[in-house]
Image (tube, rainbow, N blue to C red):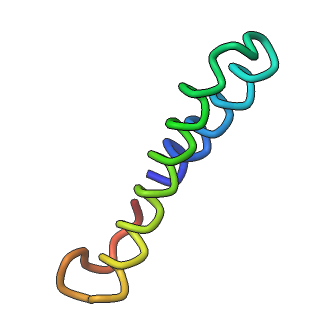
Amino acid sequence: MEFLELILVLVALLLIIKKPEKENLAFSLVIIAWFIMVFLYVGHKSSNLLTTMNL
C-alpha cells in the first residue's frame, strides 16, 4: 500500500510537470494518497482494524 501511495504522488508530480493545467487532478491524487496514509496509520494504531501485517 505504501508503494501505491508513492506511485500516486509520483503520478501527481509528473502530471504537474507535463501538463500544468491539470493541477486540480494532481492535487486530488495527493489528497487521496494522504487519506490512504492516515487510514493505514490509524488502522495500525487502533490494533483491531488492521493486524500486524506487512502491507
Q: Is residue 32 left or right of residue 20?
A: left
Depth check: 11 or 24 in front?
A: 24
Depth check: 9 or 53 in front?
A: 9
Q: Give above or below for 18 relative to 26.
A: above
> Where does the image place residue 18, in percent across and percent down from the top left?
78, 11
Q: Is residue 1 left or right of residue 51?
A: right
Depth check: 19 or 53 in front?
A: 19
> Where does the image place residue 25, in percent across and percent down from the top left?
54, 25
Residue at the image position 41 percent from the left and 66 percent from the top: 54
Residue at the image position 41 percent from the left and 56 percent from the top: 36
> Where does the image place residue 50, in percent across and percent down from the top left?
25, 74
Q: Give above or below for 42 relative to 35.
A: below
Q: Is residue 37 left or right of residue 48?
A: right
Q: Give above or below for 30 relative to 51.
A: above
- Extreme left residue here? 48
Residue at the image position 57 percent from the left and 43 percent from the top: 30
**Residue 6 lies in quadrant:** top right
Residue at the image position 64 percent from the left and 30 percent from the top: 12
Q: Is residue 53 left or right of residue 33?
A: left
> Where does the image place residue 52, in percent across and percent down from the top left?
33, 79
**Residue 24 lies in quadrant:** top right
**Residue 16 lies in quadrant:** top right
